[in-house]
């Protein structure tokens, strides 16, 4: 300012001539017009800077630098124009008078100087206010950036925690699946054991039926032998009475062979007494065997009833398991439906998000195009004004080419700086938009991860509950299997004991058969000497005794046959009833067996379907894991980009 005042004072002193005053006045009017055009250029530049600030307030430092560059350049340009005009006036008007120049200059020159200084001061104040406002906005943006960085760090920590929890959940799920497979294998083993036990029970029932039939046959044989012995004893008594009658009533003396016959009869009587003792012992043994057999049959009936109860319990357990499997299948189907709905919602959400982003981008493009059009119009105005100023500068370039060249260089620098500032501002706005989009994506990913975490926790709780119930049921089934094994061992021991008893009974029956044969042979031997005695006696007595013996034998045979037929009919009826009952029980047991096998096959098929559903669920889980890994990779890339931006 001091240099300019000194130059103005020198100009006032040197301008003397009134004619030259007019020329100087015309030149200064041209200078005043050029300065007004330059002031308009400055105002337009400031307005363009304001519009840029309004459109994007996040780039204050660049605009501030451009304004700081512009202000001294325009001031220097104004000072250069004034100095050039004044120096030109000094060179041309040295021969004028000082008095006339003082009068004219006091009236004309101060007006443009005052207008230019006021414009420059007002522009400076406006620029200072803009700088202050931009600094405050920059501080606010820095605070917001710090908050966003802190939120981003917190989100990263939460994501790491969620990934750790997801890994733990996956490990637990794998363990649960392994336990389920082990339990399924145990269930298959138990089902095979059940089949073997049912087969063994059927075999035992068949063996019991066979032993019952053998015992019944042996009882019938023993009854027949006992009846034969009774018949023989009755015949012997009749013969003995006849012999006594013959010996007592006849005067004829007995032959010489009487002592031999007496010895034989005594031996036979001894044998008969021995046989009677054996029969009594056999009857006692038979009673004991019958009592033991009845006790054993009662035990077997109790065991059968207990087995029936256990079968009913197993059927109930199988029904409960089938119901549980049906509920599990329903839960798995619900989970699949949820997963499908989740995928559909996710696709719809992504489509909506893309549409919203596209709309936002389109709006931003429209705004940017409007801003570009406005800037183009302003740029055209500036170019027009610049062309006018260039024309005026070219008119004045003849005076001082060096200064004009310097001014052109400064203008080219200003244009280059303006273009570089605009490019930097556009880059900064794009980076800010990208950061905002990245933050929105991170927030969406965090919300999705939280939802997935809640769903996984619900699934894990349900699976834990199911695993607990399955472990309880497995423990119960194992206890039942142990009880069944203990009972089977007891049954095996009883079967061994029964087989040994059966062998002993067979041996005794063989002994009884041999003894019966011996008795029959001896009875035949006893019957042979009787006719010899009858021959010795008279012919009349012989005929009478023969007829009586035949009648008695015929009557006894008829009675024995009648009694035997009645006993046999009763025994056959009883045997038929028992056989029918046993066959009905066997049929019922076989039906239950087939029904249980059918239920077991259904359960196996259901377990296979459950395994297939579990496999599908694992595949879907693997796909979700891959997607989570891709998201984590994207987040890492975003983190690296944010680190680079910092």
Image: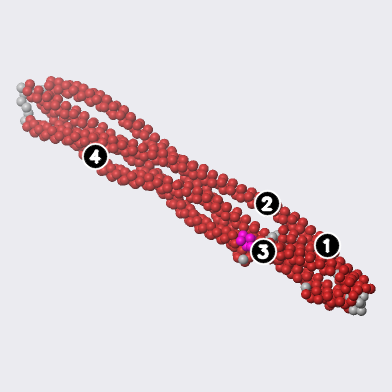
**Farthest right residue in view:** 19
Question: At which x and y percent is residue 124?
Answer: 74, 66
Question: At which x and y percent is residue 123?
Answer: 76, 65
* Marks 2,4: beta carbons within 8 A: no
Which disc is residue 356 wearing? 2
Can you see residue 374?
yes
Q: Nearer the viewer, mark 2 or mark 1?
A: 1
Sequence-wise, the earlier of marks 2 and 4 is 2
Residue at mark 3:
135
Residue at mark 1:
381
Question: At which x and y percent is residue 495?
Answer: 29, 43
* Residue drawn 19% across the image and 21% down it: 551
Q: Which residues are magenta?
A: 139-144
Q: Determine which quarter of the picture holds residue 63.
A: bottom right
Residue at mark 4:
505
Quadrant position of the N terminus in the picture: bottom right
Q: Determine which quarter of the picture holds residue 562.
A: top left
Sequence-wise, the earlier of marks 2 and 3 is 3
Q: Nearer the viewer, mark 2 or mark 3?
A: 3
Sequence-wise, the earlier of marks 1 and 3 is 3
Q: Within 10 Å of the Cα at label 4, are there few (<14), some (14-19), or many (20+) other Cα atoms?
A: some
Q: Within 10 Å of the Cα at label 2, are there few (<14), some (14-19), or many (20+) other Cα atoms?
A: few
SS category of the residue bearing label 4: helix
């Amino acid at each position: 300012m001091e240099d300019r005042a000194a130059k103005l004072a020198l100009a006032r002193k040197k301008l003397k001539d009134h004619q030259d005053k007019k020329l100087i006045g015309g030149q200064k009017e041209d200078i005043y017009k050029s300065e007004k055009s330059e002031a308009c250029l400055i105002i337009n530049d400031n307005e363009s800077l304001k519009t840029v600030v309004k459109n994007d307030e996040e780039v204050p430092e660049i605009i501030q630098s451009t304004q700081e560059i512009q202000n001294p350049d325009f001031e220097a340009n104004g000072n250069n124009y004034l100095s050039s005009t004044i120096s030109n006036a000094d060179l041309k008007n040295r021969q004028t008078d000082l008095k006339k120049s003082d009068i004219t200059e006091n009236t004309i020159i101060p007006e443009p100087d005052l207008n230019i200084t006021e414009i420059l001061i007002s522009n400076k104040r406006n620029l200072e206010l803009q700088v202050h406002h931009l600094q405050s906005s920059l501080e606010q943006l820095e605070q917001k950036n710090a908050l966003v960085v802190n939120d981003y760090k917190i989100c990263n920590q939460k994501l790491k925690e969620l990934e750790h929890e997801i890994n733990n959940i996956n490990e637990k799920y794998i363990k649960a699946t392994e336990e389920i497979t082990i339990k399924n294998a145990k269930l298959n083993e138990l089902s095979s054991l059940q089949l073997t036990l049912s087969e063994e029970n059927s075999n035992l029932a068949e063996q019991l039926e066979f032993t019952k039939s053998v015992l019944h046959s042996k009882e019938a044989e023993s009854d027949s032998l006992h009846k034969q012995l009774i018949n023989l004893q009755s015949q012997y008594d009749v013969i003995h009475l006849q012999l006594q009658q013959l010996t007592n009533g006849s005067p004829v003396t007995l032959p010489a062979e009487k002592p031999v016959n007496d010895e034989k009869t005594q031996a036979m009587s001894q044998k008969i007494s021995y046989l009677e003792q054996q029969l009594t012992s056999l009857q006692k043994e038979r009673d004991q065997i019958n009592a033991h057999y009845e006790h054993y049959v009662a035990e077997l009936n109790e065991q059968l009833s207990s087995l029936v109860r256990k079968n009913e319990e197993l059927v109930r357990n199988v029904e409960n398991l089938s119901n549980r499997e049906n509920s599990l299948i329903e839960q798995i189907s619900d989970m699949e439906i949820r997963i499908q709905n989740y995928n559909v919602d996710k696709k719809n959400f992504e489509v909506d998000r893309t549409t919203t982003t596209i709309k936002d981008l389109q709006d931003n493009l429209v705004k940017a195009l409007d801003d570009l059009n406005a800037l183009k119009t302003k740029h055209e105005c500036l170019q027009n004004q610049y062309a006018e100023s260039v024309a005026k500068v070219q008119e004045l370039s003849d005076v001082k080419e060096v200064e004009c060249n310097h001014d052109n260089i400064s203008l080219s620098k200003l244009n280059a700086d303006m273009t570089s500032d605009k490019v930097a501002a556009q880059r900064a706005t794009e980076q800010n938009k990208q950061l905002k989009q990245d933050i929105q994506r991170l927030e969406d990913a965090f919300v999705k991860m939280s939802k997935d975490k809640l769903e996984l926790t619900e699934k894990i709780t349900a699976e834990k509950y199911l695993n607990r119930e399955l472990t309880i049921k497995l423990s119960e089934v194992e206890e039942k299997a142990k009880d069944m094994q203990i009972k089977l061992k007891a049954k095996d021991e009883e079967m061994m004991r029964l087989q040994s008893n059966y062998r002993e009974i067979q041996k005794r029956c063989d002994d009884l058969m041999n003894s019966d044969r011996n008795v029959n042979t001896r009875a035949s031997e006893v019957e042979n000497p009787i006719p010899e005695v009858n021959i010795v006696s008279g012919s009349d007595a012989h005929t009478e005794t023969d007829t009586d013996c035949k009648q008695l034998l015929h009557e006894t045979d008829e009675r024995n046959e009648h009694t035997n037929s009645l006993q046999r009919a009763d025994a056959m009826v009883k045997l038929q009833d028992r056989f029918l009952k046993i066959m009905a029980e066997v049929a019922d047991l076989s039906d239950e067996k087939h029904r249980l096998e059918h239920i077991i096959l259904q359960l196996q098929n259901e377990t296979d379907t459950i395994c297939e559903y579990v496999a599908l669920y694992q595949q879907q889980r693997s796909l979700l894991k891959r997607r989570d890994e891709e998201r984590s990779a994207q987040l890492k890339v975003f983190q690296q980009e944010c680190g680079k931006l910092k």
